[in-house]
Structures are given as structure tokens and as C-alpha cells.
């Protein structure tokens, strides 16, 4: 069924990103917004706008009844959830579909499976993805956990089944701490997620975070769009992402890409997904799957030429994938810098009025942002205010262009992470591509000291 009017259940740059894809397809858009976002760019550009509540996300962007009502009132025939908020809420996806509104996202059952990290791992294993050695499912008995940890060797990591994104993890380096840490992890998981289920894995000391972008049509056809290296993170927040990963060969990509697309084909996956791996000593280990579009999707768009949001919308319309694996080519290199309204060194949030705004431009430079001069960044939401995505034929050329583009960006009135990115690009370890998930925090600690 062709889609005619999409309700965008999100805000900021991703709401704008979805609006742009929709308009390029001749589809109308409906923005929903909190009272704090009345002056936001996504509200200004959309064909229709509905205020759905007060600033607190729980009473606006997370309010299922308010969003469904807005869709009915506006006559939207589809909902795109963006990332965050309700994007990985299986119940919401079911409610949308029960209202005969097209859900621009994966099948609810797949969202649910991947949201439970124990179920996700079991499913991934059954589909042939390589796993981190660890417990086969949840830990039920301490003695069992002890035996397993002895077998795989310390250190081990205890993770919450409902966690994800690094929340509720405990590293354990000796048998005498194991029982305490399992109980602690269980208690913390119970109060944070209402679920005390935990599982155990071998702790990888110095891995990279490499994720594969996948797409399925829900009928057994699936492709991969290569990987992104997202190892540069601080407190589980990605800072800079690149594609391809500096450490993979085309053969590695083809081999892992083949494995992930076969897995998605076998499960009948629909829409966009990201399969996250830790990569250490040349081996991949599945950790989680995200059943949504990701913040860093533009680096994949830059090296493949595929509009991922357009692809999501086409699939929700019941159309086939617009490219075959054989037609896909990975060309050049792309890097994304996340620009946050925060102090570049203390990371303290810096909301407020943007007095001057000038976006970088030029060849192979893309800025995804809802900023404009005079806009007031509200204090209630995520601090990411812009993404700068630069591409080039080589990684070296891409880094040079990124430096130039960062020089051009002007955001005044609030503090931003631009100076952090400028310093980061000068670091020899970044330039050589020699960094793991630990590198950024170690570098920041050294700068302070
Ligand atoms: C791990 C790990 C080491 N060993 N699992 C953090 C977020 C969640 N997605 C999984 N995470 C990790 N799982 C094992 N067996 C280290 C991390 C981790 C991490 C992973 C990706 C990117 C940044 C990270 C920062 C700290 C820890």
C-alpha cells in the first residue's frame, strides 16, 4: 500500500531527516511536538503539526495514546519512530498496526526478541552468528555460574537481560567476587528495568565496536550495507563513527556481511537493523541487535549511496529492496562527528539560545541539524544538536576534509563539542586508526591529568 502521510514520532535532526526522505518521495509529513519544541525546525518544515504535551518526554514523545490520537486526527497512514523514544517499543509497534497505520519499522516480534538480550543472543546463535563465550541463557544458580566462569576463564562480565547500551554491567576478575557481583547486578537490574535476569560472558579486554547495517523485506530477502566502526565512545555515548572500519579487509566484510544477511533472511527480518559485534584479534563476537535506524546511519549512506530512510518507507509500503547485494558497492570513506551542546571537556550540558549558526558546506560535506540562529536549545532532551558527515575517496582525505569542515562550522551562544572533535582529529592513534573502545576515555583522562 502506498503511504501518503507519515507521522514522525520524534524530534530534532532525525525528525528532519525523515521529513526530507518523505518529501523526496512525494509523501506528506505530520510533526508531533512538546510545548518545548513549538519553535523547532521539524515542526516548521512539516506539512502538519500537532502539540502532544508538556516538555517531559514521558508526557509527549513517549505518550502512546497522544501519538496515536494525533495520527488519527491528522489522517496519517504511517508512523516513523526515528531512534530512541518509542522506536524499540514492541507494544507501541503492535498498537500502531492494530490501528491500521503502517509501522515503518521491524516486525513487533523481532523488536521484542532483540530487546531481551538473553533472547537476542540465543536467536543470534541459532542463526549462526558468532557469540561471546558465556552462559547459555540466564544465570539461575551461582554454582553453575562459578563452574562456567572457571571454564571460560576470568575476567567475566555480568550483564542484565533488559539492559543494553552498557547499563547494568559488572566486570568480575576473580571467583571470590562472583556471587556478590551477580547479586548486585541482579538487584540493580531489578530496580532499573523491573527484571533481575542476568547472564554471563567472557570479558573482552580491548575490543572494537563494529556494527553491520542490514535490511530485510520481511519475506526472506535481506542485504547488508557494510559496517561502521563506533569504537570512539564516552560513557556508552558514541562520539565519532566511521565507515568502513579501518581494521577490516574487503574479505572480512564479505564474510561477515554474508553471515549477517543470511541470518536476517532466515529470520524474515523486515526493515532496517544493526547487528553489533565486539571485534578482537580478528574475531567477531555478537553482542546486541538494534531494531531501528541509528544516529550514525549517514556514514553508511555516504559509502553506499543508498537513502536508508527511503528504503525503510519503501519496505513499509510492501515494496522490495531497491538494491541487490551484487549491485551494492562500497566506495571511499565517511566519518560522522556528533556535535553536542555541552562543554567539550567537562561534558556539562549547555542548552540555551543559539546566537549565530553557520553550517559547513562544500563537496562531500553533509550537516544534519535542526539548528538556526535564534533557536533556543531546550534543556529537556538529548544534547546532540547536529551531525557533521564528511566523505572522501580515502580515509586520509576524509580526515583532511573533516578538519576543514569543522573549521567552517560556527555555533555561538552555547558551548559545543566542536573543539573536542578538532583535538581528536590531531591524535596519532586516531589518524592511524589504532583505537579500541577504551581509547577515548583513556585519552580524556590523560588530558585532564
Ligand atoms: C562487553 C564488553 C567486553 N566484553 N562484553 C557495552 C555496551 C553493550 N552494548 C556491550 N558493552 C560491552 N560489552 C564483553 N563480553 C565491553 C563492552 C563495552 C563497550 C562496548 C562497545 C562500545 C563501548 C563499550 C564501552 C565499555 C564497555
Image (tube, helix red, strand yellow):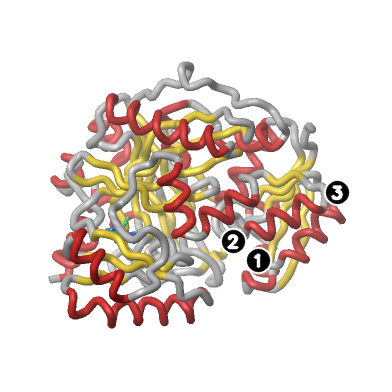
Label 3 secondary element:
loop
Count up the numbered dots: 3
Residue assigned mark 2: 85
Residue 232 lies, with reference to residue 305, above or below; the image says: below
Residue assigned mark 3: 75
Q: CA distance from mark 2 to mark 1?
A: 6 Å
The mark that comes first in sequence, 3 or 2, is: 3
Which residue shows up at 72% across the image and 54% down it?
Answer: 94
Question: Do the residues under discs 2 and 1 have CB atoms within 8 angstroms?
Answer: yes
Q: Which is more toward the observer, 81 or 316?
A: 316
- When asked about the image quadrant of residue 60, the answer is bottom right
Residue 199 lies, with reference to residue 398, above or below; the image says: below
Q: Is residue 419 visible?
A: no
Quadrant of the displayed image that contains ligand 1: bottom left
Label 2 secondary element:
loop
Which residue shows up at 57% across the image and 49% down it?
Answer: 14
Residue assigned mark 1: 62
Q: From the top left corner, tell me how far across and down residue 352 is, in percent.
A: 51, 69
Q: Which is more toward the observer, 85 or 423?
A: 85
Q: From the top left corner, tell me how far across and down residue 233 is, in percent.
A: 31, 57
Amino acid at each position: 500500500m502506498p503511504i501518503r502521510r507519515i507521522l514522525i514520532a520524534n524530534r530534532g535532526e532525525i525528525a528532519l531527516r525523515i521529513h526530507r526522505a518523505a518529501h523526496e518521495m512525494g509523501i506528506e509529513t505530520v510533526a508531533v511536538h512538546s510545548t518545548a519544541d513549538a519553535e523547532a525546525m521539524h515542526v516548521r518544515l512539516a506539512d502538519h503539526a500537532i502539540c502532544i504535551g508538556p516538555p517531559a518526554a514521558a508526557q509527549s514523545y513517549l505518550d502512546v495514546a497522544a501519538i496515536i490520537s494525533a495520527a488519527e486526527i491528522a489522517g496519517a497512514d504511517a508512523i516513523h519512530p526515528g531512534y530512541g523514544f518509542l522506536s524499540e517499543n514492541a507494544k507501541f509497534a503492535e498498537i500502531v498496526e492494530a490501528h491500521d497505520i503502517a509501522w515503518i519499522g521491524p516486525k513487533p516480534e523481532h523488536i521484542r526478541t532483540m530487546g531481551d538480550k538473553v533472547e537476542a543472543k540465543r536467536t543470534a546463535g541459532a542463526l549462526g552468528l558468532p557469540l561471546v563465550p558465556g552462559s547459555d541463557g540466564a544465570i539461575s544458580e551461582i554454582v553453575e555460574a562459578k563452574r562456567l566462569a572457571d571454564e571460560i576463564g576470568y575476567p567475566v562480565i555480568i550483564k542484565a537481560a533488559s539492559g543494553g547500551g552498557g547499563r547494568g554491567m559488572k566486570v568480575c576478575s576473580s571467583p571470590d567476587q562472583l556471587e556478590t557481583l551477580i547479586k548486585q547486578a541482579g538487584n540493580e537490574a531489578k530496580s532499573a528495568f523491573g527484571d533481575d535476569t542476568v547472564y554471563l560472558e567472557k570479558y573482552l579486554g580491548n575490543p572494537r565496536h563494529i556494527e553491520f547495517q542490514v535490511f530485510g523485506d520481511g519475506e526472506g530477502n535481506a542485504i547488508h550495507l557494510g559496517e561502521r566502526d563506533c569504537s570512539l565512545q564516552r560513557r556508552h555515548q558514541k562520539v565519532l563513527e566511521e565507515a568502513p572500519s579501518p581494521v577490516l579487509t574487503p574479505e572480512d566484510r564479505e564474510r561477515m556481511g554474508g553471515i549477517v544477511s543470511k541470518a536476517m533472511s532466515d529470520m524474515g527480518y523486515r526493515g532496517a537493523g544493526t547487528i553489533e559485534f565486539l571485534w578482537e584479534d580478528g574475531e567477531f563476537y555478537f553482542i546486541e541487535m538494534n531494531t531501528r535506524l541509528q544516529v550514525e546511519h549517514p556514514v553508511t549512506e555516504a559509502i553506499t549511496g543508498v537513502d536508508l530512510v527511503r528504503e525503510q518507507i519503501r519496505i513499509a509500503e510492501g515494496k522490495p529492496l531497491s538494491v541487490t547485494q551484487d549491485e551494492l558497492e562500497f566506495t571511499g570513506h565517511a566519518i560522522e562527528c556528533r556535535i553536542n551542546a555541552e562543554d567539550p571537556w567537562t561534558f556539562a550540558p549547555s542548552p540555551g539560545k543559539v546566537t549565530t549558526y553557520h553550517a559547513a558546506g562544500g563537496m562531500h560535506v553533509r550537516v544534519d541539524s535542526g539548528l538556526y540562529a535564534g533557536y533556543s536549545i531546550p534543556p529537556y532532551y538529548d544534547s546532540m544538536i547536529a551531525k557533521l558527515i564528511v566523505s572522501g575517496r580515502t580515509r586520509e582525505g576524509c580526515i583532511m576534509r573533516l578538519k576543514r569542515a569543522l573549521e567552517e562550522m560556527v555555533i555561538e551562544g552555547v558551548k559545543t563539542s566542536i573543539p573536542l572533535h578538532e583535538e581528536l582529529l590531531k591524535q596519532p592513534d586516531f589518524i592511524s586508526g589504532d583505537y579500541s573502545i577504551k581509547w577515548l576515555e583513556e585519552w580524556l583522562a590523560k588530558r585532564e591529568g
